[in-house]
Image: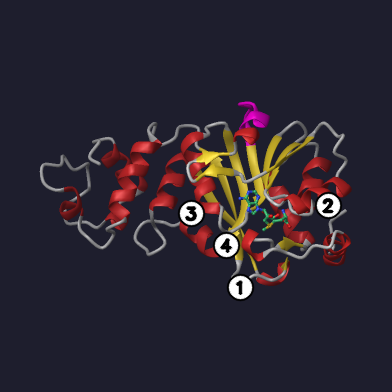
Amino acid sequence: MSQTLTEIKQLLAGHGLRPKHRLGQNFLHDHNHLVRILDAAEVAAGDVVLEVGPGTGALTERLLAAGAEVVACEVDRDLEAVLRERIDTSEDRFTLVVGDVLADKRTLNAELLDRLASRRFKLIANLPYQVASPLLANLVLDHPAMDAAVVMVQKEVADRLAAPPGGKDYGALGVLVQAVCLVRRVGVLPPSCFWPAPKVSSAVVHFQRRPEPLTDDPHALAGLLHTLFGKRRKQLGAILGRGVDWPAGVEPTMRPEQLTVEQLVALSRLNLS
Ligand code: SAM
């Protein structure tokens, strides 16, 4: 019961709609990759799932069929009618919040938070490209109720999320997320899996919250990462100054990208920034 490309086109056309580029509307019509997201997420009956950007409901229908309770947040009011046509909204396992998932860069939509009601949840979504990084940072920083996530993002964002130390992809977002979650890339999708086809490839990333996060103060870590990776070509000593009691294995001549996640967390405990 996947939505085929023809069905997605018909659903939009039936409501006089076209995909909106500014809202990152690239609809996934590849059945196999939809199944791959669901498998990676190990959705079980009774799971509470946050879906950001349900679009025409292709993934939503699958999540509901797997027995999940879906709390979905869609910013495009025009798609509300499409979703209500596809999905039985009297079904009490489906809640639709129409609005921006982010109230501002650092805060989630208040109605959405209300609907999640402090329950543990999984984020499962084909994320709009402009929202992915601030949303993931926000969930990791401020919403420990998120146990796990399986998200489709631009491949470049996936590379940053899962990056090991030393390379150009290693930066503040990846370190922050890796300090709190175990992160792995599940697969890469070519633009042809979406309609309309985006300019870049996408990738599915799986996050599992660590049983013991490496930091108990992710905000202190985020502050330090902002300072360090804003000057990533400089040496630590030049950024942080003298008199720092450098953690084991860290030298003032090293550049931020050479430090492991653990070393960056150790540095964040010194409350330098
Ligand atoms: N889930 C559908 C799929 O997989 O085909 C659509 C995914 S599409 C990449 C992204 C969706 O996110 C669109 O439906 C878009 O309208 C919605 N969206 C964009 N910005 C949003 C925001 N700030 N808050 C909530 N939804 C947003």
Question: Residue drawn 84% across and 58% down?
Answer: 3
In reply to whether residue 114 is colored magenta, the answer given is: yes
Measure how far apart labels 4 and 3 are at the Cα level. 11 Å
Pointer 3 and pointer 1: residues touching (CB < 8 Å)? no
| Towards the viewer: 60 or 24 | 24
User: Residue at left 36%, top 47%?
Assistant: 261
Spatial distance from mark 1 to mark 4, Cα to Cα? Answer: 10 Å
What residue type is disc 1 on? Lys
Whichever of callouts 2 and 1 sits on the residue coming sooner in the sequence is 2
Q: Nearer the viewer, mark 2 or mark 3?
A: 2
Image quarter (top left, top right, bottom left or bottom right) of the C terminus: top left
Name the N-terminal-most of marks 4 and 2: 2
**Mark 3 or 1 closer to N-term?**
3
- Please report the residue visible at 29 percent of the width from the left and 50 percent of the height from the top: 227
The residue wearing badge 1 is 199
Residue 19 position (above or below residue 184) = below
Judging by the rendered image, the residue that carries numbered circle 4 is: 154
Residue 72: image location, x then y, percent: 71, 42
Q: What range of the chain is rendered magenta?
A: 113-121
Q: Earlier in the sequence, mark 1 or mark 4?
A: 4
Q: Mark 2 = which residue?
A: 82
Q: Which numbered disc, 2 or 1, marks the residue closer to the eye?
A: 2
Instruction: Give the residue at mark 3.
Output: 161
Q: Nearer the viewer, mark 4 or mark 2?
A: 2
Report the Cα–Cα distance between label 2 and label 1. Answer: 26 Å
Which label was assigned to residue 243?
none
